[in-house]
Image (cartoon, rainbow, N blue to C red):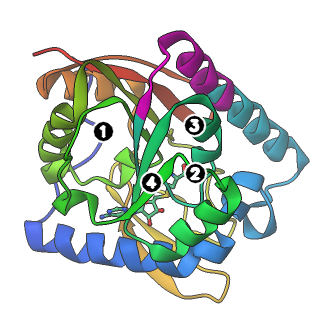
């Protein structure tokens, strides 16, 4: 059994405050969000790091697209869709996407970027939202790391309710690497479960960030009744699928 890689939260009230701050952070960050993915501005780590990042970005994009091609989901529920960095890959490949996010600012950017009539946007707090139908795929990129330990089982119970009988969840998330974040962010602690983030204007936020390894996440998902097939890119990402094992 792999070792747990993070400590339990101090209290549910701490989690609530972090989750509120997390939404406020992503709302304020919306116009500058893509700099992280594109390695521009404060996320530019120099050519060598940027090339390694881009290679890993290509790897996770290719893997997600290959999974869509082989498993052929018709309907996708995208949790925490953000500015559409993955919605843009989902929408042209499936019949319908339901894309949820708490931040109206990122939904507006996503809608303009993806410009697809088969995407239904829902502004909602994922922790308070319940599916009204079932989906062939529940897709989450860089969302699971923002789910506190205490909410993990409830989140996956919701995913179970959202999945069609032969459906699958697909996860992409951050591996722990000191160079994945902005140059002016404190180096992320692998185990704290919390990180400090800054905006371009210097405002600071503390948000949830759980760095999963494929091994630890596979074991944790098994405890929640999901069978996972996860792997890592060379440095920056963890990705793969999970199916209901109950
Ligand atoms: C790291 S971003 C990931 C966005 C996108 N999936 C991507 O791959 O770029 C996390 C997203 O979670 C959203 N978010 C944070 N807390 C949320 C909550 N409680 N309910 C719904 N969305 C939330 C943020 O607004 C943000 O868009």
Mark 3 and 1 residues: CB-CB less than 8 Å, in contact?
no
In this view, the mark in front (1 or 2): 2
Q: 5 or 52, which lies in front? A: 52
Residue position marked by numbered label 3 in the rendering? 90
Task: Name the element at disc 3.
Answer: helix
What is the C-alpha distance between the residues marked 4 and 3?
A: 12 Å
Residue at 22% x, 36% y is: 162
Q: CA distance from mark 2 to mark 3?
A: 13 Å
Q: Secondary structure at mark 2?
A: loop
Q: Name the spot of residue 244 as percent of width and height, x first.
A: 20, 19
Residue lying at 69% horizontally and 59% vertically, measured from the top left: 113
In magenta segment, residue 65? yes
Determine which residue is flagged by label 1.
5
Q: Which mark is residue 117?
A: 2
Residue mark closest to the camera, 4 vs 1: 4
Label 4, ligand 1: CB separation under 8 Å = no
Mark 3 closeness class: few <14, some 14–19, many ≥20 residues within 10 Å? many
Q: Is residue 103 magenta?
A: no
Labelled disc at residue 19? none
Q: Position of residue 159 (x, y in %)?
A: 23, 37
Between label 4 and label 2, give the one nearer the viewer.
Answer: 2
Q: Which span of residues is magenta-colored?
A: 61-75
Q: Of callouts 4 and 3, which one flags the residue occurring earlier in the amino acid sequence? A: 3
* Mark 4 nearby-residue class (10 Å; few <14, some 14–19, many ≥20): few
Ligand 1 shown in quarter: bottom left
The residues bearing labels 4 and 2 have C-alpha atoms spaced at a distance of: 8 Å
Where in the figure is residue 171, as x and y percent of width and height?
A: 43, 33
């Amino acid at each position: 059994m792999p070792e747990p890689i993070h400590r339990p939260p101090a209290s549910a009230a701490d989690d609530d405050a972090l989750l509120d701050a997390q939404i406020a952070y992503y709302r304020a960050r919306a116009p500058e969000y893509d700099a992280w993915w594109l390695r521009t501005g404060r996320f530019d780590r120099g050519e060598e790091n940027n090339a390694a990042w881009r290679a890993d970005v290509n790897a996770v994009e290719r893997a997600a697209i290959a999974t869509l091609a082989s498993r052929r989901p018709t309907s996708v529920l995208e949790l925490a869709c953000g500015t559409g960095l993955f919605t843009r890959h989902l929408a042209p490949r499936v019949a319908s996407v339901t894309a949820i996010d708490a931040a109206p600012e990122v939904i507006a950017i996503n809608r303009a970027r993806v410009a697809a009539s088969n995407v239904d946007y829902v502004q909602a707090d994922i922790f308070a939202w319940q599916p009204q139908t079932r989906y062939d795929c529940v897709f989450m990129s860089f969302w699971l790391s923002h789910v506190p330990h205490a909410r993990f089982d409830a989140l996956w119970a919701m995913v179970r309710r959202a999945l069609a009988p032969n459906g699958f969840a697909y996860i992409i998330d951050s591996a722990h690497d000191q160079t994945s974040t902005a140059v002016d962010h404190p180096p992320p602690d692998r185990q704290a479960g919390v990180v400090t983030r800054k905006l371009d204007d210097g405002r600071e936020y503390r948000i949830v960030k759980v760095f999963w390894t494929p091994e630890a996440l596979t074991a944790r998902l098994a405890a929640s009744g999901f069978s996972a097939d996860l792997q890592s890119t060379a440095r920056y990402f963890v990705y793969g699928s999970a199916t209901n094992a109950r």
